[in-house]
Amino acid sequence: MRVFMTQWFARWAAAEKLTNSVLASAVVELEQGLVDAELGGQVVKKRIALPGKGKRGGVRALLVFSRGDRAFFVYGFAKNERDNVSSKELKALKLLARELLSYTQPALVKAVKFGELIEVVGHG
């Protein structure tokens, strides 16, 4: 299972003090079937606990998720900021999911090389 995050998500996660190990743990939970919401088109929502605050004071992450294959953290928000994404945003996320999941190995290498995607290390 390879885990990536978009450049935007990486900046947001750093601001929220989410470490690679916290993100990797969230993906392990997804692999175990602990999905908070399946939004369709292989887009899922996962609650993530912030250090010292637990899941109640945590954040929500939207991922493109293909069980046993790849996970891409694409969007995040604090639970107190919003409950969900709009239907227009979800449509765009589903298009992004289709694009990300179509990446071949060389395309993934290129995306990482140019900083479009960041691989989450220290998982598995």
Image (cartoon, helix red, strand yellow):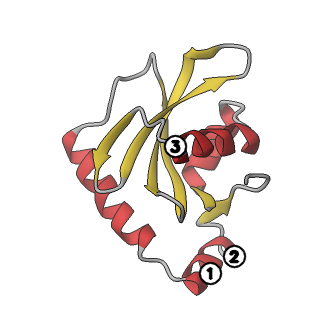
Question: Mark 1, residues whose alpha carbon is within 10 Å: few (<14), some, or many (≥20)?
Answer: some
Question: Mark 3, residues whose alpha carbon is within 10 Å: few (<14), some, or many (≥20)?
Answer: many
Residue 30: mark in rendering: 3
Amino acid bearing label 2: Lys
Residue at 70% across, 55% down: 120
Can you give x and y, in whole percent of width and height, for residue 54 in the image?
63, 16
Q: Is mark 2 on a helix, strand or loop?
A: helix
Displayed quadrant of residue 28: top right
Question: Mark 2, residues whose alpha carbon is within 10 Å: few (<14), some, or many (≥20)?
Answer: few
The answer for how far apart the CA atoms under marks 2 and 3 are is: 27 Å
Q: Of the residues under marks 2 and 3, which one precedes in the sequence?
A: 3
Can you give x and y, in whole percent of width and height, for residue 102 in the image?
41, 76
Q: Does 9 sit left or right of 115 as displayed?
A: left
* Residue in front for this viewpoint, 123 or 83: 123
Tell which residue pokes out farthest to the front in this image.
32
Question: Looking at the image, do the residues carrying marks 2 and 1 touch, with CB atoms under 8 Å apart?
Answer: yes
Q: Is residue 38 above or below residue 36?
A: below
Residue 113: mark in rendering: 2
| For discs 3 and 1, the disc positioned in front in the rendered view | 3
Residue placed under numbered mark 1 in the picture: 110
Tell which residue pokes out farthest to the left in this image.
87
Q: What element carries label 1?
A: helix
Tell which residue pokes out farthest to the bottom in this image.
106
Residue at 46% across, 20% down: 79
Q: In this view, does 3 lie above or below 63?
A: below
Q: In this view, does 35 lie above or below 52?
A: below
Question: Looking at the image, do the residues carrying marks 2 and 3 touch, with CB atoms under 8 Å apart?
Answer: no
Residue at 45% across, 55% down: 65
Question: Looking at the image, do the residues carrying marks 3 and 1 touch, with CB atoms under 8 Å apart?
Answer: no
Amino acid bearing label 3: Leu
The answer for how far apart the CA atoms under marks 3 and 1 are is: 26 Å
Residue 47: mark in rendering: none
